[in-house]
Amino acid sequence: MEKFLGIDYNVWWFLVFGAVISGYAILDGFDLGAGALHLFLKKELSRRIAINAIGPMFDGNEVWLVIGGGALFAGFPVAYAAIFSAFYVPFMVFLMGIIFRAISIEFRSKEPMLWWRTAWDISYCVSSIVIALTLGLMLGNIALGMPLNAQHEFSGTGYIFLIHLPC
């Protein structure tokens, strides 16, 4: 097994992947929380302040996800293949949430009409909640374990979309 500074490459990749995912969780967690609570802010000034607080950073946080996917692919290609094939639908829902969150933030102030701003505020709040829920769903299922066959392919059923706690 190859080593760098006396440590196996698998350990290094694990540390890189863990650091990247931790960075995303910490930095985008603030953005997701601001989005999830957005509709509870009744004054327009409060909503504007909350969006301005995340404005410079929210797009950049998705870079953490790209780096995390690349690190997972480079360090653990079998895990990458199993996870991405097992969670295809939740990943697509997650990506739609990311897209709608960005669109909502960009479009909400493009027109002065109240219905326009309200529609994008709702979209922003819902997409932030969807992102957090799908990430929690996927990470919870990964932590509980995924059934793989002898070829290291996902062999479970559709239950993977719900977290089943052990009895």
Image: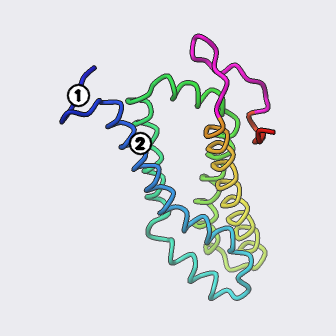
Horizontal side of residue 118 vs 142, given as left or right = right
Q: How crowded is mark 2: few (under 14 residues within 10 Å), some or many (20 or more)?
A: many
Q: Is residue 32 found left or right of 40 in the rendered image?
A: left
Hey, what amino acid is under mark 2?
Phe
- Residue shown at 70%/54% (left/top)? 130
- Which quadrant would the N terminus be assigned to in this image? top left
* Foreground residue among 71 and 19: 19
In this rendering, would 76 be left or right of 114? left
Res 140 label = none
Q: Which amino acid does label 1 sit on?
A: Lys
Residue in the image at 51% along x and 71% along y = 54
Please report the residue visible at 56 percent of the width from the left and 67 percent of the height from the top.
31
Q: How far apart are marks 1 and 2 (CA)?
A: 17 Å
Instruction: Quickly name the residue at label 1.
Output: 3
Quarter residue 104 falls in: bottom right
Q: Nearer the viewer, mark 1 or mark 2?
A: 1
Q: Nearer the viewer, residue 50 or 29?
A: 29
Q: Main secondary structure of the magenta part?
A: loop
Which residues, given as a range, are shown in magenta?
145-159
Whole-percent x and y of residue 156? Answer: 73, 23
| Residue holding disc 2 | 17
Quick one: SS at disc 2? Answer: helix
Q: Position of residue 150 (x, y in %)?
A: 60, 11
**Is label 1 in a helix, a strand or a loop?**
strand
State whether residue 9 is above or below residue 162: above
| Left or right for 29, reference 7 | right
Magenta span contains residue 90:
no
Circles 1 and 2 in contact, beta carbons < 8 Å: no
**Residue at horizontal 78 percent and vertical 74 percent from the top:** 115
